[in-house]
Amino acid sequence: MKVSMNWLKKYADIPMTAEEYENRMIMTGTGVEGVEKLGSEFDHVVVGRVLSCRDHENSDHLHVCEVDVGGDAPLQIVCGAPNVKAGILVPVALPGAHLPGGVTIKKSKMRGVESEGMLCSSTELGVPVELYPSVGAAGLLIFNEDYPVGTDVKSIFFADDTVIDFEILANRPDCLCVWGVARETAAAMGTELRLPEITVQEAGGDIHDFARVEVRDAELCPRYAAKVVKNVRIAPSPLWLRQYLHAAGMRAINNVVDITNFIMLETGHPMHAFDLDKVRGRHIIVRRAEAGESLTTLDGKTYDLPQTALMICDEMGPTGLAGIMGGEESEITENTKTILFECAAFDRTSIRLTSRALGIRTESSGRFERGVAPATVMDALNRACQMVNELDAGDVVGGVIDEYPHPVSPVTLTVSCRRMARRAGVDIAPEEMVEILKKLQFVVTRDGDALTVTAPAFRQDIEQEADICEEVLRYAGYDRIPTTRLRGETTTGGLNDKAARQEALRRGLTGMGFYETMTFSFVSPKVIAMLGWPEEDKRSQPLMVRNPLGEDTACMRTTLLCGLFRTLETNIKNGNENGRIYEMGTVFDARNKTAEGLPTESPELAVGMYGAGADFYAVRGVAEALCRRAGVAYQLADCNEPYLHPGRRAALVSGGETLAVVGEVHPDAAERFDLTGRVYVAVIYLPALFRLSTPMGEVKPIARFPAVARDIALVMPEKTPVGPLMDAIRHGCGPLLEDIRMFDVFRGVQIGLGNKSVAFSLTFRAADHTLAEDEINRLTDKAVRTAERHSGAVLRS
Amino acid sequence: MDIRENLSRIGEELEKELHDLDALQALENLKVRVLGKKGSLTALLRGMGQLSPEERPKAGQLINEAREKMTRLLEDKQKELAEREKEARLKKEAIDVTEPRDLPLIGCVHPMNLVLNQVLDCFTSMGFDVAEGPEVELDHYNFELLNIPKNHPARDAQDTFYIDDNTVLRTHTSPVQARTMLSRKPPIRIVCPGRVFRADEVDATHSPVFHQIEGLVIDKDVTMGDLKGTLDAFAKRLYGPDIEVRFRPSFFPFTEPSAEVDLTCFNCHGKGCRVCKGTGWIEVLGCGMVNPKVLSMCGIDPDVYSGFAFGIGLERITMLRYGIQDMRLLYEGDLRFLRQFR
């Protein structure tokens, strides 16, 4: 909300520096987003009078002028503008002047003639024609008024104004206007609020002879008020009004339209002026659009109207989009003779939905969306008529039309001073509360601790004691809130189970050299499809977002792999060596709904690695280490994830549940995801891992009797899997086999082609005695025989 | 020849040889030549048989004394040589300690989790539990119970991702508040970290996915002073004892009164710099006293209980903490970025 300080200061004094003022406003709830000194784009430009003007001897279009800028002697300035002539008053950029666009004026020679500055057009100064009339870029700006030479032209165009861009909170639409900011300013400064007294000179007649208003949808239009002005005299607005509009970022058009915009900016009530002679039947009907209706708005665009849209119509059809934009048909023109001023209150939601549906946002719709108080409509309408009087823009017809079937009564609350002070945590005396509320135009009566408070008509946000408490605290000062410690019953506090387990996994992965990554929760269904799951797999049926930003964020992830592959691709492309990354996050299952009908959300962990030290066994090791750490016993099992290499993939399972899948990325998947080189991934299903994890129990005593190690080498066909063979040996030897480790695999002609020799180190130990030589031999034999029985492996001789 | 002469000759020769000796093996040889079975001193001892019985004790004593002395000399020399050889070995084994090698791998959690862990440590130590809720959330919890009724501008499709008419991607972590109040009795002290979603295009300061940390306290007689005290403790714990907290009036539908919270700029300590745009303050979070309407809707009697809530943007405090200029870095996973964290 941009506010001209000149305009604001008409209604409230600001007896402090700009910085102090801004700070005070911020601390009472009106934020400051920016401050702009108008005209700061140029300097050293003054009013000058062209004393003489002759043709340049070396040019057919340049002139050499003598210009009086109020100095000791006139300046000689070369000028090429077609409208330059002796006698005119023009803006003169002196040597050293800065102009918009980074231009600096210097003394120079133009075709051999000295030039001590530049005569300016409005375009060169960045002064729009609607702020000050001129021929624009076609020639010099010529002042119509008789300003003294040497006057700083900034003061003429901008009246030395400063514009503050205030940040108005969503619950304070009443502050979206100069009066609103003035009310807050006066309260914050402790100065007097001087809003104008509104009086209207009426020229006689009765509005009911001129127009009729019929509100057919009072729900969407709780109030519709109108005044008529006849003998309208369309003209440009005076400079001060054009300056106010310019400062607020609006364009001046003509006196009638400018009055409606002025009223909106000053009072917060958007208004509209209709050319009443173009309103067919002079009958205004407020109703929803009917099927097939369309409207051409002021900006010349035609819209097909949704039937929910509230329209201002005449007897033939729509003539304006209520609260958003007027129609072209009844637009004010130079020939307008009679106007109807509309000042109304419309339903916020209706305006918002229509504005969204048609894609039109205006100063007016923005204000209605945030809420315009029906109770203050008449003030704004009368103020508009007062302006008509002031600008002599026409004759105000007597009487008013005011369709307001259910007047809004002011909100009155009874509140407790003690409760409010306790809520705020600040010791504010009841007297101070009363004073603050009165300053904010609340009507207050006090009975001991109880205040009976009536909110001013312009406030629509006051509903309960907490709201009054906020008003009081804002002006008592948020700085007075003390810093106190929480009291009451002690609570233990701590991470929840899931967060604690996830944190433990993170610590493990950090220790193994992995960096954590994060990617978005939504992905493209096409990217999920690249993983190759069959259509009936639930992971191929993601939860779709109804209004995604784009196709690549159209659904919720059913796996972390899409993000992981993308992050791997980024790192490989960027030449980052030896990548080890993981992501832990939520995946969404659209098919299994919770009791509330929401998709099931589960945590998942995806690990990826490439480069030195990365191979199938390394990534499997990561998954295994995490399972062990969680105290989960698992077996290796087949895995048929299509994105993994069919000969280099496995699952970690426990009691029929899959804890993890691990493997090398299938070359087809690698190609689809743009991964070069061999990449290894693991997906760990955390709900299963967490469910099966076991807490750590008591420690076992350290064995007192010595262990004995025996190495054996077994020859077996190449295809024999070693893992199950080791499981069989473990099972066969029983608890006396403390450990079995594979330490070598040998392939060579000595043991026959298609065979491998696998060397194991067996560690035997008994808890209650030292193993004797024959016991050890018997156990070793048992290991060999078990291996033979299990997979035909024979002891290498 | 006189035995004395012999002894002193052997002694002199030994001392002379010891003096020139520089290897342990040579020392061993010398020892054998003098003290060994066929050694010169041993020969002298054997030759005692030729002496008269009166001379023998005297000679025996002399020889033994000489033997002891020589043994001592040999031992000293041996120690000396062993020490010298060790020194030589150590010298020979010296390596270039500046030669580089690959380091053992150690990773790091995501920068946002580094910061989150600090935040959670702080609040859990003040008795807050960590609570979580679904990311795909019912409209009822995300909006309705938080005093954001149907058709409120905050629900616009421009800001909110919808799954269907009643289901949204939560736009804040505040629905966890509502869920907690409905399922637990006061006193309640929770923090709820989590992902939230808003329909913003990706740029340096916006992301359609981001993280919040919500806090909620409900108890009897909770005041805005308690809120400020709690956030003051948080700020000082995270950023240092000289950090001040400033409350500014603000508005949120689910709190009343509401405040925007600034902290002393931790870059310039309030002097004014690029990070705080010269103000000396950095806006870090929004908070307020829980709106009594929200308490009522969530089944808590606002005449008995009051409470406060706050919401911290995790991306923002992470970016401020590490001077990260572009939010996209947090979601790209580029190891050149991640490897800087510890």
Image (cartoon, rainbow, N blue to C red):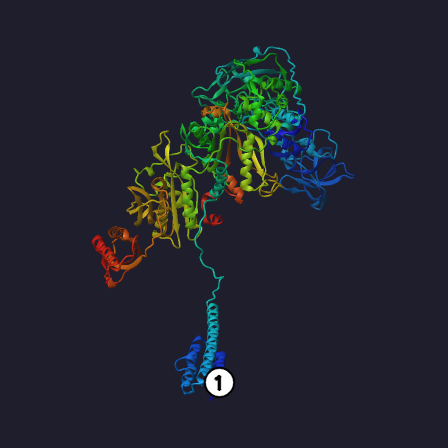
The residue indicated by pointer 1 is: B4
**Callout 1 amino acid:** Arg
> Which residue is more in the foreground, B84 or B265?
B84
> Which residue is more in the foreground, A416 or B85?
B85
Q: Residue reaching furthest bottom?
A: B1
The image quadrant of residue A440 is top right
> Which residue is more in the foreground, A530 or B216?
B216
Numbered disc 1: secondary structure: helix
**Is residue B150 in view?**
no
User: Around disc 1, counting alpha carbons within 10 Å, would you say few (fewer than 14), some (14 to 19), or many (20 or more)?
Assistant: few
Location of the N terminus of chain A by quadrant is top right
Q: Position of residue A791 (x, y in %)?
A: 22, 53
Location of the C terminus of chain A by quadrant is bottom left
B237 over A595 or under it: above or below = below
Q: Residue reaching furthest right?
A: A72
Count of labels in the image: 1
Q: Residue reaching furthest front?
A: B54
**Is residue A524 in view?**
yes
- In the image: residue A47, left or right of residue B21: right
Chain label for disc 1? B
B65 over B209 or under it: above or below = below
The image quadrant of residue A29 is top right
- In the image: residue A13, left or right of residue B106: right
The image quadrant of residue A129 is top right
Q: Position of residue B119 (x, y in %)?
A: 50, 39
- In the image: residue A464, left or right of residue B183: right
Q: Position of residue B39 (x, y in %)?
A: 41, 82
